[in-house]
Amino acid sequence: MKKFTKYEKARIIGARALQISMGAPVLVKTDEMDPIEIALLEFEKGVIPITVRRK
């Protein structure tokens, strides 16, 4: 897993939580209902389909 800055991590998790709250499929098995907690779990497992492009 690549190293992300705290700002990149916050942006990735926030964007993914928004996707989940709008009905996107969840990529991990969990009983959690909070989109932010689900996004954090997905981030920790490295399954979020979001990439970071740096200049």
Image (cartoon, rainbow, N blue to C red):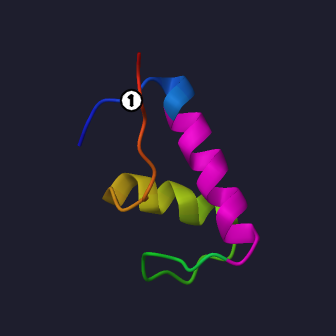
Q: Residues within 10 Å of mark 1 (few under 14, many from 20)?
A: few
| Picture quadrant where residue 55 is located | top left
The magenta-colored residue range is: 9-23
At x 67%, y 64%, the residue is 19
Where is residue 24? Give x, y as percent.
63, 75
Question: In the rendered view of the protein, which quadrant contains the N terminus?
Answer: top left
Q: Is residue 17 magenta?
A: yes
Where is residue 13? Give x, y as percent.
57, 48
Q: Specify the farthest residue to the right.
A: 22
Q: Is residue 14 magenta?
A: yes
Vertical comparison of 55 with 7: above or below: above
Q: Amino acid at mark 1?
A: Phe
Q: Specify the farthest residue to the front.
A: 55
* Left or right position of 27 against 21: left
Where is residue 34? Give x, y as percent.
70, 68
Query: What number of labels is visible?
Result: 1
Describe the element under mark 1 as helix, strand or loop: loop
Dominant secondary structure (helix, strand or loop) of the stretch shown in magenta: helix
At x 26%, y 35%, the residue is 2
| Picture quadrant where residue 4 is located | top left
Vertical comparison of 6 with 33: above or below: above
At x 66%, y 69%, the residue is 20
Which residue matches tag 1?
A: 4
- 45 or 50, which lies in front? 50
Q: Specify the farthest residue to the left.
A: 1
* Left or right position of 6 against 51: right
